[in-house]
Amino acid sequence: MPPETTLPGSAARSDTSAAELAGLDALDTPTVARTPWWRRAITVGLPPLVALVLSIVIWQILWAAAIWPEFKLPAPITVWQAVESRLVTGEVLSILWTSISRAFLGFLAALVIATPLGLLVAKVKVVRRAIGPLLSGLQSLPSVAWVPAAVLWFGLTDATIYFVVLAGSIPSIANGLVSGIDQIPPILPRVGQVLGARGLTSARHILLPAALPGYLAGCKQGWAFSWRSLMAAEIIAAGPLLGVGLGAYLKQGSDLNDISMVFSAIALILVVGIGIELLVFRPIERRVLRARGLAAGV
Amino acid sequence: MSTTTSAVPVNDVSATAVRLSGIGKTFGSGADAVTALQGVDLDVSAGEFVCLLGASGCGKSTLLNLVAGLDEPTSGELVRPTGSPSFMFQESALLPWLTAGRNVELPLQLSGLSRSARRARAADLLSLVRLDGMADKRPHELSGGMRQRVALARALAAATGPDGTGGGVLLMDEPFAALDAITRDVLQGELLRVWEATGTTIIFVTHDVREAVRLAERVVLLSSRPGTVVAEWQVTERHGAGGERLHDHITSRLRQVIASHAA
Ligand SMILES: Nc1ncnc2c1ncn2[C@@H]1O[C@H](COP(=O)(O)OP(=O)(O)OP(=O)(O)O)[C@@H](O)[C@H]1O
Ligand SMILES: [Mg+2]
């Protein structure tokens, strides 16, 4: 069926055209500039470091001015000593470990529950109509509101803590996945279809990778919520059956009227929250977005 | 050069790759229903290269989507090719999380080809579209023209199958419309070469008469609102005076069709 007419001089022409194409490619290929890691570390790490040092300096000045009594505003050094004295006994590590392990276990459990839930809500219309609004409503419910109910149901046990953490993070993760799936450009599922992907194959090769950025954003927020909920639960639900986490430590400080203990607890809570975000979620998100050419700002 | 008006040549049924009879497609319902296609009859035999020509918005993409099975016709009878046809979209539609090479490999992977075999095949296809050594680039690291060439390689991978022997159907929706003239010229040449080598059936949508005359064995002209077949030309001579005359003739017919909508 191919036509018998041959293209005149096609071999010679294809050689020059290859060169022309290569020339065009060289002209309009986007160039991706990579900055060395140390330069990035300086540009990313220096400004917050300066801000931190400045705020400690201001704190120190305020303290030195003695506007507030010592039991309201401690000196930075006293707070550091509160941490340091517990650091040498290993108490700080055990407190951190208690809280972080709880938050992570809770977060993992939330992932396991929220991922299929999000898939269901995104892909099954009836489910979306039924629990979609509830799921986004729950996201704005402060998880501390769950603590009294959980205490009544489970008593002062780990179950109470985990329940509150799950209640706090599941809606974020599920909603993240739903919006990730909703934002998939409609062309991509069609591409999958014409390439021969159906059902589960399509989910694996098209749906999930395409929804990954939204899902990751949901996970990041889910982590923040799980950490926040954990602190709320630990502050309110303290008891002999529960190990001492950061929240309980904060509560102790308040009960003992020890403002330096309170400050050190707040500082530790902040450090962990920011640290996990910077060390775990930021790099993953960066990698994923970069691979797709989406990471202009991160 | 033969001019037939909406009469479809009767082909041997066994050699028919795609057959549309009385195909209609209406979007929506009630007052704001849009009839994109109406009474479209078209037969494409196996191994044929057909160009669908028509003004913007006349329903060319809709027609290809129906043939591809991405959409269902509201009326008429449609015989689709056996096996899913391969499709090249108007935009490159690469998967942004895969490298160029993995994008080309995907249809082969889905058809169950082993890793090393599909990698080798993808490398062949990438070098066919003059993208040697670009397999590890991500779509966003490529220019628009290069992306479209990767998409062409992927469509060819799907159309010619794991062994590259072809026999499939390749549907192309204005694949080269967004490219500069030189790239388009090269890719048209490559496409003809691949078609001659593999005997793939190609339905190629364009609004560029010159492109249609250069590529196709048969040019089919669609009218707009609703889209229907108004004329067909068999292209026997692609170059020289005959090709020029055919080009001028089709262009004037296309102008007529477009002008008739002004009334
Ligand atoms: N999903 C849809 N819903 C409603 N109307 C649609 C839809 N898809 C296409 N149409 C309409 O059908 C008509 C044909 O559209 P189509 O995209 O097939 O045109 P086309 O010939 O491919 O145009 P172009 O050359 O610009 O790509 C247009 O009038 C368009 O508005
Ligand atoms: Mg179109």
Image (cartoon, coloured by chain):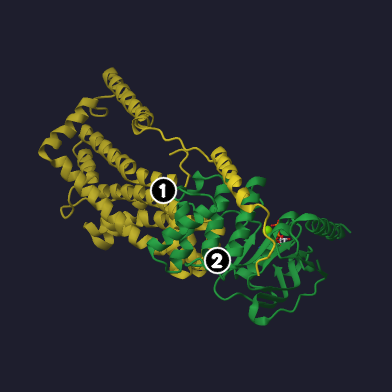
Res. B21 in view: yes
Residue B191: give x, y in percent of width and height.
Answer: 61, 58
Q: Residues within 10 Å of mark 1 (few under 14, many from 20)?
A: some
Looking at the rendered structure, the kind of residue marked 2 is Ala
A183 to the left or right of B66: left
- In the rendered view, tell whether residue B148 sits above or below residue A277: below
- The chain to which mark 2 is attached is B
- Number of numbered discs on residues: 2
Residue A107: give x, y in percent of width and height.
Answer: 31, 54
Name the quadrant containing residue B169: bottom right
Residue A92: give x, y in percent of width and height.
Answer: 17, 40
Q: Residue furthest bottom?
A: B13
Q: Nearer the viewer, mark 1 or mark 2?
A: 2
Q: Residue at x 33, y 28 (%)?
A: A49
Q: Residue furthest right?
A: B263
Indicate the secondary structure of the residue bearing disc 2. helix
Q: Residue at x 30, y 40 (%)?
A: A275
A269, A116: nearer the viewer: A116
* Residue under numbered circle 1: A288
A153, A41: nearer the viewer: A41
Q: Residue furthest top?
A: A65
Residue A91, labelled with which disc? Answer: none
Q: Residue at x 69, y 59 (%)?
A: B215
B189 to the left or right of A226: right
Chain A tint in image? yellow
B215, A195: nearer the viewer: B215
Tags 1 and 2 on a common chain: no
Residue B159, labelled with which disc? Answer: 2
Looking at the rendered structure, the kind of residue marked 1 is Val
